[in-house]
């Protein structure tokens, strides 16, 4: 993987990629990671994973390393076939050498709590997951396998999600979708950065965008870096000081 901007460098190793994509020290952050085709399709055959390749997967895994939590909408977790949030051995060693827990917490966003408590997301989780839902939602058996917390009334409030996680010492959050969750966090002004992979394909079809389901809320972002692997681009944007 090569750096195109700022500056130029070839065949960056993992440590160089981690340094390049690092968030500012000493502050809370929430960033999102998505992939899209160059004509804007966020999925192929219903899954974002269908757009990626080995280079995308490499960066995908590296971006998880410094996070206290991985945040995801429940629908996306089901569609993409997520299991327990367990990192590879190299990532575990990297985290432990820096005083981090071996694995990040898996944080799921779900209004309906339509989740199977026996699914691998819970049964194989190395750390007890957290489910952020709405007041009055009935946790049932999910309360046996996850911490279920109310973060809103009719809908999950992204700012309350961030506040509830911060109160639990979870200050660095890496989000992986889906589009409705991303749009809600954008609308709330709760997104600090975006890592966007541009897959070098024109997909056409009726696949949606990386945001969906919320009114437009333009948010100012600045380009922090551009990476390339073959014809694939990896764009890193951070929120501007004004956010508008």
Image: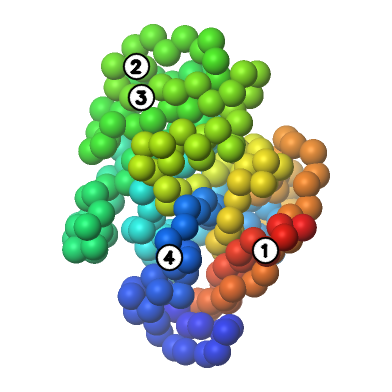
Secondary structure of the residue carrying tag 3 is strand
Distance between mark 3 and mark 4 Cα atoms: 28 Å
The label nearer to you, 3 versus 4, is 4
Secondary structure of the residue carrying tag 2 is helix
Question: Tag on residue 182?
Answer: none
Tag 4 residue: 25
Snapshot quadrant of residue 143 = top left
Question: Tag on residue 147?
Answer: 3
Distance between mark 1 and mark 3 Cα atoms: 34 Å
The label nearer to you, 2 versus 4, is 4
Sequence-first disc among 4 and 1: 4
- Above or below, comparing residue 1 to residue 202 in the picture: below
The label nearer to you, 2 versus 1, is 1
- Does any portion of residue 179 appear in the rendered image? no
Distance between mark 2 and mark 1 Cα atoms: 39 Å
Tag 2 residue: 143
Question: Tag on residue 241?
Answer: 1
Residue 19 rendering spot, x and y as whole percentages = 40, 74
Query: Crowding near pointer 3: few (<14 within 10 Å), some, many (20+)?
Result: some
- In contact (CB < 8 Å): disc 3 and disc 2: no
Residue 240 rendering spot, x and y as whole percentages = 68, 64
């Amino acid at each position: 993987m090569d750096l195109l901007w700022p500056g130029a460098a070839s065949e960056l190793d993992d440590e160089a990629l981690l340094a390049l994509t690092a968030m500012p020290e000493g502050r809370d952050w929430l960033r999102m990671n998505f992939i899209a085709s160059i004509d804007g399709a966020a999925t192929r055959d219903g899954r974002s994973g269908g757009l990626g390749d080995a280079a995308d997967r490499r960066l995908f895994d590296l971006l998880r390393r410094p996070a206290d939590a991985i945040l995801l909408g429940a629908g996306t977790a089901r569609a993409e076939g997520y299991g327990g949030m367990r990192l590879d051995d190299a990532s575990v060693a990297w985290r432990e050498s820096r005083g981090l827990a071996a694995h990040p917490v898996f944080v799921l966003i779900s209004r309906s709590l339509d989740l199977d408590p026996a699914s691998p997301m819970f049964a194989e989780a190395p750390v007890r997951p957290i489910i952020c839902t709405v007041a009055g939602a009935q946790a049932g058996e999910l309360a046996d396998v996850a911490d279920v917390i109310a973060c809103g009334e009719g809908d999950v409030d992204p700012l309350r999600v961030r506040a509830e996680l911060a109160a639990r010492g979870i200050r660095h959050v890496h989000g992986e979708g889906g589009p409705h969750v991303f749009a809600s966090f954008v609308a709330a002004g709760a997104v600090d950065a975006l890592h966007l992979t541009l897959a070098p394909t024109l997909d056409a079809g009726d696949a949606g965008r990386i945001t969906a389901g919320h009114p437009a809320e333009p948010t100012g972002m600045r380009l922090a870096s551009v990476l390339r692997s073959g014809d694939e681009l990896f764009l890193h944007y951070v929120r501007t000081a004004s956010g508008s």
